[in-house]
Every structure is written in C-alpha cells, then in structure tokens.
Amino acid sequence: MAKVPPVVRPTSIGSSAVKRKAGKPAAIAASKPRKARLLSEAEIREVFRRFHAENPEPKGELESVNPFTLLVAVVLSAQATDAGVNKATRALFKVADTPQKMLALGEDKLRDYVKTIGLYRAKAKNVIGLSKRLVDEYGGRVPHDRDALESLPGVGRKTANVVLNIAFHEPTIAVDTHVFRVANRIGLSNGTTPLAVEEDLLRVIPHQYLLHAHHWLILHGRYVCKARKPECWRCLIADICRFPDKTPAP
C-alpha cells in the first residue's frame, strides 16, 4: 500500500517571507541599509575651498601657551567642553605650565584647579602621571612622536593627533564626535569607527587643506552642522552636502 504524503500545513510567515526567492538564505533576506553616496574629488575640493575662503587660519578653541599645556588641555577635554576646560586651566597654567611645575603642584592641588571638569580625579592622576613620564624620559619636553605620545597616561590617538597638528604642524586628523558626524553627513566618509573616518579623510582631502581640515570640520559641526538640528539654511556647503534631511530655515 502506498504511503500517504504528510499534510503540509500553512505557517504564519509574513508576506515578505512568502515572496522570498527560492534558495535565498533567510539571513540575507533583510537587506542592509544602503550607504550614502560619497562626494566626488571635485566636490571635496570645493568643500574645503569654501571652508578656506571663509576661515583661512582656523584655530582650536582650547587655550594653551606651549606644547605641554596643550597636551594637558586636550587630556582634560575628554567628555568636557572646551569652554569648561579653559575656565579651569587659565588659573592652572599660571602656576604650572611645565611638567616640572605640575609635579611640584601635586595631584591634590591639581584636583582643586580642575574639579569643575568631568572625571577630574582620573584626569588629574593622568596629568601628574604624564608629567612624570615627560620629566623622567623626555627631558621635560613633549615628544614629537605618535607612539611616544600615545604611551603617556590619558593620551589616545585623538589627543596625539591634536598635539601633532597644533604643536608640531603635522597634517593629522583628530576625529572627535563633531568630525565623525560631519564627515558622514557631508559624504566624505562612510566610516563606522573614528579610525576608519580618519583614514578616509586623510585619503580624500586635498593635501593643501589637510593641516586645517579637522579644525574646519570641528567648527562646522559645533556651530552649524549640529547633532540634533543642523542649521542647513546657513551652511556654506549645503548645495554639495549629501545629508538628505536638511533643516529648513526657521
């Protein structure tokens, strides 16, 4: 007697699954969001030509008097505003503008100067630690070397890039939250990590603009291309920018 084939009952799968082509793995049925189209070489050059025309010599907003105070200011600025750091360091740098003076000041007194800054206890410990390293290993000077800088307490790649750029005039790109956001919005990068964005920017920005590029992007992100509500109506590159949800004039 022939076997009766089992009854195949309908399941509760959705219509999208029903339309799935035979043999298509379920794992790739849901397509990934498409990445934004990147700017062309000519468009990138025009973006930075406009930035340069508007502000030929952009400056970082952290206040410092030498490479050491710059390094300290950048270490203190992690997860803090430049304005808040400047308010604390104006008095600090009057009494401790070298690693030797910072060590003489000591961690307890340093904390009193920077206690208005977030994470001030850990940051004060790092500043004293990097000051000691500079005195013991580098003759009290800030090294002009990425690996040496990144070996100091509290110093990561972004901090090293800022110091190399401002103190030593190297064409580095320090990717903070502003640079990361603006680069992806404009169409300069599709990078999903700060390092990926940094590498993209170093590759695509014309060399003549690299020295000031990260300052232009930071300032643009801080004052125009804001996180929650970009002020697209007054953006000097709005006609080039790839951001689809441009904010209309109020």
Image (cartoon, rainbow, N blue to C red):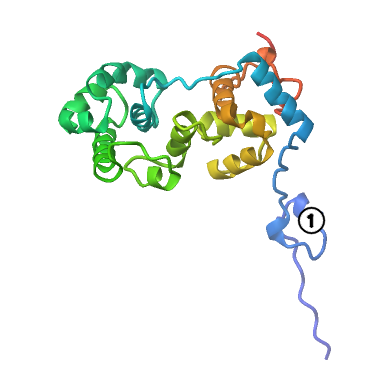
- Residue 155 on image: x %, y %: 37, 40
The residue located at (33%, 27%) in the rendering is 69
Question: Mark 1 belongs to which amino acid?
Answer: Val
Q: Quadrant of residue 3?
A: bottom right
The residue located at (55%, 21%) in the rendering is 219
| Residue sitting nearer the eye, 234 or 35 | 234
Q: Quadrant of the C terminus?
A: top right
- Furthest toward the front, the residue is 139
Callout 1 crowding tier (Cα within 10 Å): few <14, some 14–19, many ≥20: few
Q: How many marks?
A: 1
The residue located at (76%, 29%) in the rendering is 43
Q: Quadrant of residue 223?
A: top right
- Residue 186 on image: x %, y %: 68, 29
Residue 40 seen in this snapshot:
no
Residue 108 seen in this snapshot:
yes
- Furthest toward the top, the residue is 250
Is residue 228 positioned above or below 234 on the image?
below
Q: Quadrant of residue 221?
A: top right
- Residue hosting label 1: 18
Question: Is residue 19 shown left or right of residue 249?
Answer: right
Question: Is residue 58 shown left or right of residue 132?
Answer: right
| Residue sitting nearer the eye, 171 or 92 | 171
Is residue 200 positioned above or below 111 on the image?
below
Q: Quadrant of the N terminus?
A: bottom right
- Furthest toward the bottom, the residue is 1
The residue located at (37%, 32%) in the rendering is 71
- Residue 87 on image: x %, y %: 33, 16
SS at mark 1?
helix
| Residue sitting nearer the eye, 136 or 116 | 136
